[in-house]
Amino acid sequence: MTKVIPLGVFVRVNEFVEGLVHADEPAGRSAGEGQELRVRILEVDRARRRVRLGLAG
């Protein structure tokens, strides 16, 4: 995880991509910077260059 903000947490997926785990997800409220999370890609918005992530089961 790279950054915690009120909206959720940003997670580095690979060297070039970061995505957001929204605060509605449990880790969005309790995770800290540097912590590793298993995530899955929920949505890719190429036009806005955004990736929405959710916690992997």
Image (spheres, rainbow, N blue to C red):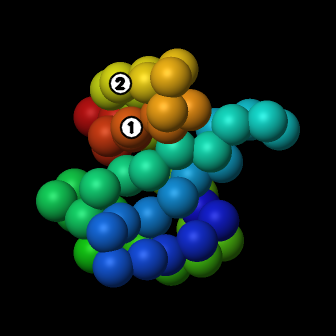
Callouts 1 and 2 close, C-beta under 8 Å: yes
* Residue ID at (33%, 43%): 55
Q: Label 2 is placed on what type of residue?
A: Glu
Front residue of 51/30: it is 51
What SS does tag 2 mark? strand
Residue indicated by mark 1:
52
Vertical arrangement, residue 16 with respect to residue 2, above or below: above
Q: Amino acid at mark 1?
A: Arg
Quadrant housing the C terminus: top left
Q: Position of residue 46 (x, y in %)?
A: 52, 20
Instruction: Identify which residue is drawn at 35% across, 66% down.
Output: 8
Across and down, in percent, residue 43 comes to 35, 24
Could you say which quadrant of the image residue 17 lies in?
top right
Q: Is residue 35 left or right of residue 40?
A: right
The x and y percentages for residue 26 are: 22, 63
Circle 2: is it few (<14), some (14-19), or many (20+) Cα within 10 Å?
few
- Look at the numbered disc 1 and give the secondary structure of its residue: strand
Residue 19's place in the image compared with 44, above or below, is below
**Does residue 7 appear left or right of residue 20 in this picture?**
left
Count of numbered badges drawn on the protein: 2
Work out which quarter of the rendered image holds the N terminus and state it: bottom right
Residue drawn at x 28%, y 75% as measured from the top left: 29
Task: Read off the residue under disc 2.
Answer: 43
